[in-house]
Amino acid sequence: MSLETFLIMRHELLLTAALLVVLVAELFSHPDKKGPIITLSVVCFGIITALGFIPSPEGELFGGMYVASGSRLMMKNILNIGVLLVILQSVDWLRRGENSDKTSEYFILLVSTLIGMNFMISSGHFLMFYIGLELATIPIAALAAFDKYRNNSAEAGIKLILISALSSGILLYGLSMIYGTTGTFYFNEIAAVFSDSNLQILGFIFFFTGMAFKISIVPFHLWTADVYEGAPINITAYLSVISKGAAIFIFIIVLFTVFPVIVGTWQKAIYLLSILTMTIGNLFAIRQQNLKRFLAFSSISQAGYILLGFVGGNQLGMASVIYYVLVYIFSNLGAFGVVLAVSNASGKENIDDYNGLYHTNPKLSLIMMLALFSLAGIPPVAGYFGKFFLFTAAAEKGFFTLVIIAVLNTIISLYYYLLIVKAMFLLKSETPVEKFRSTLYTRFALGLCVAGIIVTGFASTLFEFIRNLSFGV
Amino acid sequence: MINFSYTIWILLLPFLVFLLLGLAGHKLKPKLSGLIGTTGLGIITFLSYLTAYQYFFASEKVDGVFQKIIAFNGVWLQLTENLHIDIGILLDPISVMMLVVVTTVSFMVHIYSIGYMHGEKGFERFFAFLSLFSFSMLGLVVATNIFQMYIFWELVGVSSYLLIGFYYTKPSAVRASKKAFIVTRFADMGFLIGILILSFNTKTFDFITLTSLTGPAITQTGGAAFMGLSVITWSMIFVYMGGVGKSAMFPFHIWLPDAMEGPTPVSALIHAATMVVAGVYLVARMFPIYAIAAPDALNVVAYVGAFSSLLAAVIACTQTDIKRVLAYSTMSQIGYMMLALGVSGYGGHDGLGYMASMFHLFTHAMFKALLFLGAGAIIHAVHSNYMTEMGGLRKYLPITHATFLIACLTIAGIPPLSGFFSKDEILTAALHHNKLLFAVEYAVAGLTAFYMFRLYFSIFWRKETHYHHTPHEAPLTMTIPLIILAIGSVFSGFIPFSELVTSDSMPFESHIEMAVAIPSVLIGIAGIGIAYIMYKKETSIPDRLATTFKYSYKWAYNKFYIDEVYLYITKNIIFRYISTPIAWFDRHIVDGTMNLIAFTTQLLSFRIRNYQSGQLQKYGFVFVTGAIALAILFAYLWK
């Protein structure tokens, strides 16, 4: 293979190289001084993110098992940005005493999951897809149990690994049925011969549930609340944004390219699950007191909105999904970033603890407000445009009832997002969170989130760019 | 071709200054924030002058016509293939002229404010708002499409609201800001309806397409659609409604006098020179449609303009608050501009009215800003707005006196000051088109000279009032802008407007028509003369006149009770018969529905909480059940 060919899988190679660099640096570093490792990792990852944007050739590798196209590269870049934000936000947390002996493990696990996601997104073959999926899932379980001496965290890890084993089992079962009836694992070959025989549909349903598990679509979502609550906050952020985003990306690619024949069928399933997901996510989110748990349920309902982009099977739908994930990365990581900063400084994680936050930490409160507004979809921040395009995509194909239900759900979600805003700005507290100053890394990450929330909303060229790379059924 | 891409900075810079002062202003020293704001505007002024020079004198004309240049364009929201909202910069004669007007006056006001607002609380906030206003106004002026114009139109409204209510602890200022915002917002509703009708029928927002002679707005006029007028005519009348609100024309003029509650530099900038002429600019921008496709709408423009100008001139003769006199005078002069557009034809010498209107807009901006800033200097010196508490000020305020006199002579139309030239063109255009409107404007010219000199004599001559402390001349930062604007007022009449700004961008020859010029100068002098007799020295003539014409005087003094009529209509008719039922509907039906949703939501969320038990085996059970349910649905229902 020539160098040119290697460049096609540049993202994965760069990440592997970074992983090795951190691993080797760990061998030579002083056990008590982890500062250099952190800096090295952040710098490494920053460079990788930047390099990802250099245009690179499209093509196939390994006999078509690996596919690189414009849209897939863009998806990887979006994930890179998200992971960079997560890493920046994690620095403070990594510097705490109990984590100091596993700094490099954190990066290595994080980067390996990202490599898995990248392979999954680039797959043109179900085996490649499955390997990527597992590589993306198993290290996350380790990350969820990162605070292994804390019961919650250990519980989160074991729950995640068990339930994803169940889901993988079902998914593999489905894939084997598809293989059995079509005789191939290649995406394009399956698409050519796929019909709607019962066995194939059953195989498809099992594949569908496996993906629904990753995206935490109702009723395959129950694990999220416990895992999100138990895992360290930055891992929760990672799970709810990056991991979910990657699954959404590959799911839409597979649905649109492998199963276009049965589009009329999966449309109905998505239609139903979208309504269920956003409604039930909302209903649970209303009752939450713990912010992590709250954001977990809000991210379930967000997944419901994202399904609106799937339902039409149109190009605008795919563009709006990708765009929404990008916006969602900035918004949700902005919210998580604030929660993480407050938790690091004061150990407080409940909504009540945020009473009067504006008076002690006005900037953090403003960032939080902006992020929540974006999640709720209030103009003129990016989240509004994201929802607007999703709803337009569904309306373009005539799913008006679905759009109306989604709008009603956004109204409900407005209520609980504003509850937090109200707590921060209007309510008073006897024991407010003390005034504190975040470190450079956190401020940088939050600044990026704010810039993202504002700029992605107004830079329409971005959406046009995404639209040009998207495709329909 | 000259590259005009630098004009993007004309928009960006004031916005950046606004962000800087708005976010970090309280950390800076007041003096520094004033300096930043003023420097920023100085740079923009320079850039605008450069643009004007390059556009008018250095760029190529095609067949003697100034080209419309898109200096920058970005698609912001793609609605359909043709219909998209852009943000861009359009350079054509009127937008370039407006760039010069807006930046000049704004720059002067910035310098002036450093002195005038010295020591005020919220100094940096003031400059932040000024920058926001400049940004919005410039964005409005260079808009490439009607939707961009609408966005910035609203932004100017917001900045005007913020600045009128600058002294937010003063109830009257808060009331005035609310009034201004609500009245103009109401008018803007018409504007939006107009935009929607227009773009629905033409499938475009773009100004160049809209106003092109072969474009859809002009060629597809269609027949009568509603009440004998075509769709385009209706849309243009609605669009004009927005202009009526922003330009304080009858019947939406009631906000302008109250808006004088804002700091005086704001009145000079927003409520005299720039924002209030936005309505005129709007009509000028869409002029080909008005002139060719919607002549009935253009007639509306003419009559509304003429009536407003007469009404305002009569009211101005009776007011005693000097800023209010100036406010009504502004309204009257804008009426002139509207009328000039209304009587204009399209193309060549027919477009005299158009040219005259733009000319008057330009000269008016100079002398009216000068009058307001002068009034500011007077108020600064005597701490009162009422001319009854002034008199004999010429000794104390020599520079203000001289510049104020120049401005009064200019607005009265005395040659060779600029007001003479522009007003003369307007009267000529009116004479050729409509004798009635000419007669009205001729009378208004006399009234204008009268009330301006009533103001002048009452302030600077008449009796010597006893002041608490001796008035003193304003500081240099305030007098220098006065002098510069005075120079502008004197000489801007010599700019050959007919060679630069015309309806079809094709230069034509214009000359002074003696048959109009001489009578108009005469009536101006007559007005000054009457004011001289009545107000130069303290006499009893004004009081006697007021008693003789008791009722008409009272009517005019109370602004013809228009405010009261509005109050009656809103309180007793709209609130009682429309709003109350709507409120009931809102409270019971709309809120009731929402409460029902909330109640159901709470109930449901309470019911389903048990599914989230924390037991993994239960989760697995639900998972598998879900898969089976999906399989059943797929197999039996959806296949």
Image (cartoon, rainbow, N blue to C red):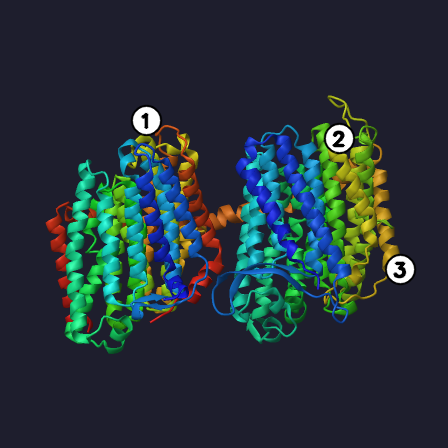
The residues bearing labels 1 and 3 have C-alpha atoms spaced at a distance of: 82 Å
> Residue A9 sits in which quadrant?
bottom left
Q: Which residue is mark 1?
A: A431
Q: Residues within 10 Å of mark 2 (few under 14, many from 20)?
A: many
Q: Are marks 2 and 1 in contact (CB under 8 Å)?
A: no
**Label whose residue precedes the other's in the sequence (3 or 2):** 2
One can see residue B540 in this view: no
Looking at the image, residue B454 lies above or below residue A223? above
Q: Residues within 10 Å of mark 1 (few under 14, many from 20)?
A: few
Mark 2, mark 1: which one is toward the viewer?
Answer: 1
Q: Secondary structure at mark 2?
A: loop
Looking at the image, residue A18 lies above or below residue A33? below
Chain of the residue that carries numbered disc 1 in the rendered image: A
Are discs 2 and 1 located on one and the same chain?
A: no
Question: Residue A43 in the image: x percent, y percent?
Answer: 41, 44
Amino acid residing under circle 3: Met
Amino acid residing under circle 2: Ala
- Taking B590 as reference, is B222 left or right? right
Q: Nearer the viewer, residue A144 or A369?
A: A144
Q: Quadrant of the N terminus of chain A?
A: bottom left
Looking at the image, residue A106 lies above or below residue B205? above
- Taking A132 as reference, is B416 left or right? right
Q: Which residue is mark 2?
A: B474
Amino acid residing under circle 1: Thr
Marker disc for residue B514: 3
Q: Please tell me how many numbered marks the rendered image carries.
A: 3
